[in-house]
Image (cartoon, rainbow, N blue to C red):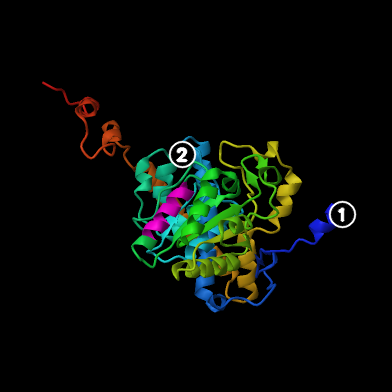
Amino acid sequence: MASRRVNQDLPVIARFEVRHRNYLAPDGSISRPLPAFASDANLLIALYRAMVLLRLFDKKAVALQRTGRLGTYAVSLGQEAVSVGIASAMREEDVLLPSYRDNGALLWRGVKLEEIMLFWGGDERGNCFSGPVHDFPFCVPVGSQAPHAAGVAYALKLRKEPRVAVCMFGDGATSKGDVYEAMNFAGVHKLPIVFVATNNQWAISVPLRLQTGSETLAQKAIAAGFTGEQVDGNDAVALRAAAAEAIAAARDGKGPRFIEAVTYRLGDHTTSDDASRYRSADEVQAHWKQEPVARLRSYLVRQKIWSKADEEQLAAECHGRVEAAVEHYLTMAPRRPETIFDHLYAELPETYAAQRRELAGEHDG
């Protein structure tokens, strides 16, 4: 008993907190005063248009995979606001390091639909995309892009360039050593980097409660020495605001930031997954009531800046863009087999050069 009293008398040397950001309620009403940029109707409509395009594209990509014209594909159903909202706050000169589910961010930054299909169709030309040349390609291994992002941010600081690295990954990645090490390195060196964890509640079939004992993912930034914020991942306005503040702070030399975007993966993990084996239909249906596309549309309608005619026109436009991209993708000639050697070495060793000539139909001697 005496020992317990002594422990209670120990001084508190530090206290930490994690804040949660939200502006739009699920029905599109306003839950707290909006940030200044929300008065720009054109920006909000652009966010909405990008989310609708992504959702329609995902649906088409799944259909292509089911008919054998695309490889395994990861949909963004239910979490479109995260990649679009984060990317919308970036400057072109910033560096994006995406995961395999961040198509919305790539599209916002200029990547073409057919280029994304090329990648998921097994053609590496899809990674030579039309977005900023300094952006990194898709990262399929979980969390391995985080150390790369820390390295990029270190280079930006070393060169004294006012640019920021933005690293996106899922909730499962926060349980990987790669992410912890990258965050620790970023905190020590006060690097210009923003880590974004899309907390969609599932790491494939593993629920969040079995991944981590942390009450939030955002608090994991505290141990690395910087601020973590939790954001409503179904609120595009909140994501844009959080990303803009975090990126601005990192650009101004204030060090890293961490954003936990709390959302829900309404679809399967990938087209190779069957989520009905590990979660109930009732659980998924409950989360449909909070999804981001309908939420932002409801807000725009409430503000009288979006109409049924606008919606019909957008649907037709997105359908046309997707179908045109699919036609372009399906009519592209496949790479010749000898091109597998083209990016192995600056100067191809003769052993491989001979194999390349053989594949190309050339004959020595």
- Using the image as rendered, state which of residue 98 and residue 295 is in the foreground: 98
Circle 2 Cα neighbour tier, 10 Å, few/some/many (<14 / 14–19 / ≥20): some
* For the residues bearing labels 1 and 2, Cβ distance under 8 angstroms: no
Mark 1 vs mark 2: which is more N-terminal? 1
Give the dominant element type of the magenta stretch: helix, strand or loop.
helix
Q: Residue at x 74, y 53 (%)?
A: 286
Q: Is residue 174 above or below residue 84?
A: above
- Using the image as rendered, state which of residue 203 and residue 177 is in the foreground: 177
Give coordinates of residue 111: x percent, y percent.
40, 55
Q: Residue furthest left?
A: 365
Give coordinates of residue 46: x percent, y percent.
50, 67
Which residue in the structure is indicated by mark 2?
A: 70
Q: Secondary structure at mark 2?
A: loop
Quadrant (top left, top right, bottom left, bottom right) of the C terminus: top left
Residue 288 found in image quarter: bottom right
Q: Is residue 150 magenta?
A: yes
Q: Nearer the viewer, mark 1 or mark 2?
A: 1
Circle 1 Cα neighbour tier, 10 Å, few/some/many (<14 / 14–19 / ≥20): few
Q: Residue at x 62, y 64 (%)?
A: 235
Q: Which residues are magenta?
A: 145-156
Residue 290 found in image quarter: bottom right
Identity, as a three-letter code, of the amino acid under mark 2: Leu
Q: Visible in this render: residue 111?
A: no
Which residue in the structure is indicated by mark 1?
A: 2
Q: Along the horizontal axis of the image, is 290 left or right of 361?
A: right
Q: Residue furthest right?
A: 1
Q: Visible in this render: residue 106?
A: yes
